[in-house]
C-alpha cells in the first residue's frame, strides 16, 4: 500500500515534468500571454525601484507610454509606467505612484494620463492594481523572483488542446508584449478601430464624471507642485467617436479640467489624436505608442528646458471645476 | 493560509514530518496541533487569533462552569451563546443591520449614518468565523444537554476547536465526535494514508481544476456591468456556478477529510452527490451535511421540529431555512435563497410531488430535473451581487431569447469547449452515481484497483497544469 503512494507520487512527478517540457502553448496569443501577464503585473505592483518619472493612468496610458522611448529623448532618466487596466486616478494610486519616485531625483515628475474613465467612481477600486497587490506572498515571491519556474508550470486550457484538433483559432488575434518598465506593447490583428464602440457605450451608460475625483486630482497636482514634483497631464489619444462618446455620456469637459490642472501648477499637454492610430478605437498600437511616447518626451523636454520659475510653488489652485456639462 | 498555495505545501510537509514524533504523548500532541492550527490561521491575519482564543476560552470556561455549578448551568450556556452570537453579530452582521436600520429610519425621515461611525475592524470578516463559532456552540450546548463531558485540558479543547484541516470552512465537527479521537494516539495504517491521498487529490482536483476554471466564466458573467442578453448563456452560467460551488466546497471538505485521515482522525462526510437528489429534502440530506444537521439539532428540533403539528413544523422549517440563509452571508440575497428553499420544501411537503412524480415512467429523472430547477433559481440569488441583478438575470433566463449564434459571439469556441468539458465531465460523474454504477466495479478483474495510482497521478498533474485562475475558496467568505 505504501508502494502505491510512492508509485503515484513518482508517476505524477514524471507526468508533470514531461508536460512542462512539451506542453502546448495556446494558439491564441492573448491566452498564451496570460502567465507572462500575471508575472508582469506582480512585478509592476511590487517593484521596489525608484524612478525620476512615474506614469499613472488606465489601460490607454498603459498601452500608450513606452518608458524606454521617453528615456531615449529625455536622456539619463528613469521612467516607470505605473498605469493599470481599469485604473482610476484617485488618492490610493497617487500615493502608490509617489512611492515609486526617487526622493533624491533631480527632477521628480508625475505623468497623468487622464482619460475620462479614470475619473469615474466605478474605477476607484483600481481592481487590477489591488488584485496583484493582494496576491499571496508565496505567489508574489515565485513570480517576481522565479518567473521561469512559474512559466514552466503555466496552466493549459483543455479547450485549447481540443481546439487544435478542430483547428479553432480566434478571428482576431490580440498580441501583448510585456516590458519590465511597466509598458504593454499591444496590437490587434486585424485592427478594428470601431471595436470598442459598442462595449464602451454599454459600459458608460448611466455613468458620470465624479466631481470628488476631479477635485482630488487638482488638489494632488497642487500638492505635488508644492513639493517640487513636476506634474504633466494629458488625455490619451483616441478615435474621434470615442472622444465624442465619452464627452457626451460622461459629461467630460476637457478644457475645464486642463485649466484647473494648470492653475494647480500642472502642465496640460495637447496631442492630436489623428496622429496616433489605435487598434480598437481607444488604445494605441505599439508603433503609435512609440511615436506618442517620443512626442510626449519632446514636450516634456521643452518644458524642462524653459522651466518657468515664475510659477509660484505655493499658489493656491483654482477651485476644482464642475466637469459635467 | 490557503490549501491551494505553495506555502501550505511547505506547511503540510513540515506538519506531517513532525507529527509521528509528537503524537504519542497527549499534551505534546495537543500542543503541536494547536500551534500548527494557529500558524495556519494566523498566516491570514494573526490579529484574529485573539478572537478565536477569546471566544474559545469563554466556551472552555463555560463548559467547566456548567459541569461544576450544574444549578446555574443555564447561565453559563447563555454566556457562551452571547459570546459566540455576539462575535458573529459584531464582525459579520453589524454592517448589514446598520445599513437596514439606516434605510428604515430614512423612510420615516430620519437621516442617520450608522456605518460611518463603525470602527474599521468591524468591517473585516474574520475567515471561518461562522464555522468555528458554530463548532464552539455545539460544544457548550452538548454539555448543557448532558450529552458531553467537558474537557479539563485547555489544549485538548483548542486542538478540537482550531484543528487546521477544518478550521476555516468545515466540515463542522461535533465535539462528541472529535474530542474522543484526539485523546487517542491513533496510528495511521497504510490504508488510512492511501485513503487520505485519494481524498486530498480528489479535493484539489475539484477545487483547482473544475471550480477555479468555471469561476473565470461565472465571475466574468456576474461582473459585467450589463448582463448579457441571452437566455442560453445564463442557463449555462448558472449551471457553471452550481458545479463551481459544489466542487469548491466539497473539494475543501475532501481535502480536510484527507488531511485529517493522515493525522489519524475521521471527519464526517459533508457532501453526498447533492445534484442527484430527487426531492428538496433529499438535497438537504446530501448538501453541506454538517451544517444542515447542525441546524436540525440546534435550531429546528429545539424550536419543536415536527412534533407540534404540521403548521408549527412549517414555521420551524421556515425559521431554520431563513437563519441558514443569513448564516451564509449578511445580505438579503442569502435570506431570499433560504426563502426559496423554504418555499420549495413547503410545496413539497404539501403536495408530496416527489412520490407522485417518481411513480411515472422516467419519474426519477423528472424529479431530479424539478429539484435542480429550484436549486438553480436559488443559486441566482446566492451568487448575484444584488437583488436587482438577480431579478435581471432570472428575467434573461426565462426570456428564452438568443440562440447558439449569440452564445458563440459571447463566449467563442475555446471557452465553449472549456465549459462543456468541465460541466459535462462533472455531469457524467454525477450520472455515474445517479444510476448506481458506482456499486459495481468499473473495470473487471481488479484492474480498477491496479490502475488507481495512474488515475491519481494524472489527477495530480491535472491540478498543476489544468488549474483554473480562481483563488480562495468561496466558503471562506462565510
Image (spheres, helix red, strand yellow):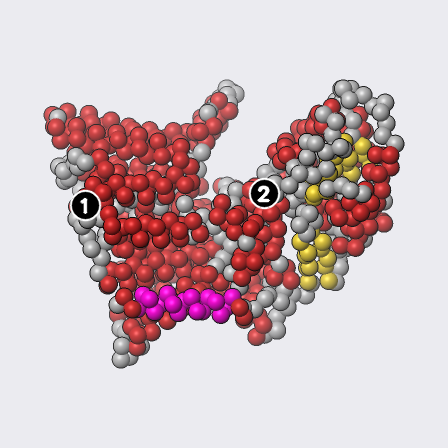
Side (left or right) of A32 relative to B141: right
Magenta span? A4-20
At horizontal 65% and vertical 65% (from top left) the residue drawn is A170
B431 is within the stretch colored magenta: no
Say which of B472 and A183 sits in front. Answer: A183
Residue at (70%, 28%) from the top-left corner? A220
**Residue at image mark 1:** B25
Could you tell whether B440 is left or right of B91 in the image? left
Residue depicted at x 50% and y 49%:
A139
Q: Residues within 10 Å of mark 1 (few under 14, many from 20)?
A: few
Give how far across and how far down residue B357 sits, in percent. 31, 62
Percent from the top left, x then y, of residue B336?
41, 42
| Chain that bears disc 2 | A
Determine which residue is flagged by label 2: A46
Q: Is residue A139 above or below residue B359?
A: above
Q: Give the main secondary structure of the magenta stretch.
A: helix
Q: Residue at x 38, y 67 (%)?
A: A10
Q: Where does the image place residue B279, in percent across and percent down from the top left?
A: 31, 56
Check if mark 1 and mark 2 are on a common chain: no
Of the 4 image quadrants, the one containing the N terminus of chain A is bottom left
Q: Is residue B390 above or below residue A211?
A: below
Is B351 situated left or right of B175 in this image? right
Task: Look at discs 1 and 2 and give the one toward the viewer.
Answer: 1
Determine if the magenta segment contains residue A17. Answer: yes
Amino acid at each position: 500500500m505504501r508502494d502505491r503512494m510512492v508509485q503515484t507520487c513518482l508517476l505524477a512527478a514524471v507526468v508533470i515534468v514531461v508536460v512542462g517540457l512539451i506542453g502546448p502553448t495556446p494558439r491564441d496569443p492573448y491566452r498564451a500571454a496570460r502567465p507572462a501577464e500575471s508575472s508582469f503585473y506582480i512585478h509592476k505592483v511590487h517593484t521596489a525601484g525608484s524612478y525620476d518619472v512615474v506614469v499613472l493612468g488606465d489601460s490607454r496610458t498603459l498601452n500608450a507610454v513606452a518608458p524606454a522611448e521617453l528615456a531615449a529623448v529625455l536622456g539619463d532618466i528613469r521612467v516607470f509606467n505605473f498605469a493599470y487596466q481599469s485604473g482610476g486616478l484617485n488618492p490610493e494610486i497617487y500615493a502608490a505612484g509617489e512611492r515609486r519616485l526617487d526622493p533624491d531625483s533631480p527632477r521628480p515628475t508625475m505623468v497623468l494620463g487622464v482619460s475620462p474613465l479614470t475619473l469615474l467612481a466605478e474605477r476607484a477600486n483600481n481592481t487590477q492594481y489591488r488584485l496583484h497587490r493582494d496576491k499571496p506572498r508565496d505567489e508574489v515571491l515565485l513570480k517576481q523572483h522565479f518567473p521561469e519556474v512559474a512559466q514552466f508550470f503555466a496552466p493549459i486550457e483543455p479547450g485549447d488542446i481540443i481546439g487544435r484538433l478542430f483547428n479553432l483559432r480566434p478571428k482576431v488575434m490580440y498580441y501583448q508584449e510585456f516590458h519590465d518598465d511597466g509598458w504593454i506593447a499591444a496590437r490587434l490583428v486585424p485592427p478594428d478601430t470601431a471595436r470598442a464602440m459598442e462595449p464602451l457605450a454599454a459600459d458608460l451608460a448611466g455613468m458620470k464624471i465624479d466631481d470628488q475625483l476631479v477635485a482630488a486630482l487638482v488638489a494632488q497636482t497642487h500638492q505635488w507642485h508644492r513639493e517640487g514634483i513636476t506634474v504633466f497631464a494629458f488625455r490619451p489619444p483616441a478615435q474621434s467617436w470615442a472622444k465624442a462618446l465619452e464627452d457626451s455620456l460622461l459629461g467630460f469637459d476637457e478644457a475645464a479640467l486642463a485649466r484647473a490642472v494648470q492653475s494647480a501648477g500642472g502642465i496640460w499637454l495637447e496631442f492630436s489624436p489623428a496622429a496616433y492610430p489605435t487598434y480598437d478605437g481607444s488604445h494605441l498600437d505599439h508603433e503609435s505608442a512609440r511615436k506618442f511616447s517620443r512626442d510626449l518626451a519632446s514636450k516634456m523636454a521643452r518644458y524642462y528646458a524653459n522651466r518657468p520659475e515664475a510659477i509660484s510653488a505655493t499658489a493656491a489652485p483654482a477651485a476644482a471645476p464642475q466637469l459635467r456639462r | 493560509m490557503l490549501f491551494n498555495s505553495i506555502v501550505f505545501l511547505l506547511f503540510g510537509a513540515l506538519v506531517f514530518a513532525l507529527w509521528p514524533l509528537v503524537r504519542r504523548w497527549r499534551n505534546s500532541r495537543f500542543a503541536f496541533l494547536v500551534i500548527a492550527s494557529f500558524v495556519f490561521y494566523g498566516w491570514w491575519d494573526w490579529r484574529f487569533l485573539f478572537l478565536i482564543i477569546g471566544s474559545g476560552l469563554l466556551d472552555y470556561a463555560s463548559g467547566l462552569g456548567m459541569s461544576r455549578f450544574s444549578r446555574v448551568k443555564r447561565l453559563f450556556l447563555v454566556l457562551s451563546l452571547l459570546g459566540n452570537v455576539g462575535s458573529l453579530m459584531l464582525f459579520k452582521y453589524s454592517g448589514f443591520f446598520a445599513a437596514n436600520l439606516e434605510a428604515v429610519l430614512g423612510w420615516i425621515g430620519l437621516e442617520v449614518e450608522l456605518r460611518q461611525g463603525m470602527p474599521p475592524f468591524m468591517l473585516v470578516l474574520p475567515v471561518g468565523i461562522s464555522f468555528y463559532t458554530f463548532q464552539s456552540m455545539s460544544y457548550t450546548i452538548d454539555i448543557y444537554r448532558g450529552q458531553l463531558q467537558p474537557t479539563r485540558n485547555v489544549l485538548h479543547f483548542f486542538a478540537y476547536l482550531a484543528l487546521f484541516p477544518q478550521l476555516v470552512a468545515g466540515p463542522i465537527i461535533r465535539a462528541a465526535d472529535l474530542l474522543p479521537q484526539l485523546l487517542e494516539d491513533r496510528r495511521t495504517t497504510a490504508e488510512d494514508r492511501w485513503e487520505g491521498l485519494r481524498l486530498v487529490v480528489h479535493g484539489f482536483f475539484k477545487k483547482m481544476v473544475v471550480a477555479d476554471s468555471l469561476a473565470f466564466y461565472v465571475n466574468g458573467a456576474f461582473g459585467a456591468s450589463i448582463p448579457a442578453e441571452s437566455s442560453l448563456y445564463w442557463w449555462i452560467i448558472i449551471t457553471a456556478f452550481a458545479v463551481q460551488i459544489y466542487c469548491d466546497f466539497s473539494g475543501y471538505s475532501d481535502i480536510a477529510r484527507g488531511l485529517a485521515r493522515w493525522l489519524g482522525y475521521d471527519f464526517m462526510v459533508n457532501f453526498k452527490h447533492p445534484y442527484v437528489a430527487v426531492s428538496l429534502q433529499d438535497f438537504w440530506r446530501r448538501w453541506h451535511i454538517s451544517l444542515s444537521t447542525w441546524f436540525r439539532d440546534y435550531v429546528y428540533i429545539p424550536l419543536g421540529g415536527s412534533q407540534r403539528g404540521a403548521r408549527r413544523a412549517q414555521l420551524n422549517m421556515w425559521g431554520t431555512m431563513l437563519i441558514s440563509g443569513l448564516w451564509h452571508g449578511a445580505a438579503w440575497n442569502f435570506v431570499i435563497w433560504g426563502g426559496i428553499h423554504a418555499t420549495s420544501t413547503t410545496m413539497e411537503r404539501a403536495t408530496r410531488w416527489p412520490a407522485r412524480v417518481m411513480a411515472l415512467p422516467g419519474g426519477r429523472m423528472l424529479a431530479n430535473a424539478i429539484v435542480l430547477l429550484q436549486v438553480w433559481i436559488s443559486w441566482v440569488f446566492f451568487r448575484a451581487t444584488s437583488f436587482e441583478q438577480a431579478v435581471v438575470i432570472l428575467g434573461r433566463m426565462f426570456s428564452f431569447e438568443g440562440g447558439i449564434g449569440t452564445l458563440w459571439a459571447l463566449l467563442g469556441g475555446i471557452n465553449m469547449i472549456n465549459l462543456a468539458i468541465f460541466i459535462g465531465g462533472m455531469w457524467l460523474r454525477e450520472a455515474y452515481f445517479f444510476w448506481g454504477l458506482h456499486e459495481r466495479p468499473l473495470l473487471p478483474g481488479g484492474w480498477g484497483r491496479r490502475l488507481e495510482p495512474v488515475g491519481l497521478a494524472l489527477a495530480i498533474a491535472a491540478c498543476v497544469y489544468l488549474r483554473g485562475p480562481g483563488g480562495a475558496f468561496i466558503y471562506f467568505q462565510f
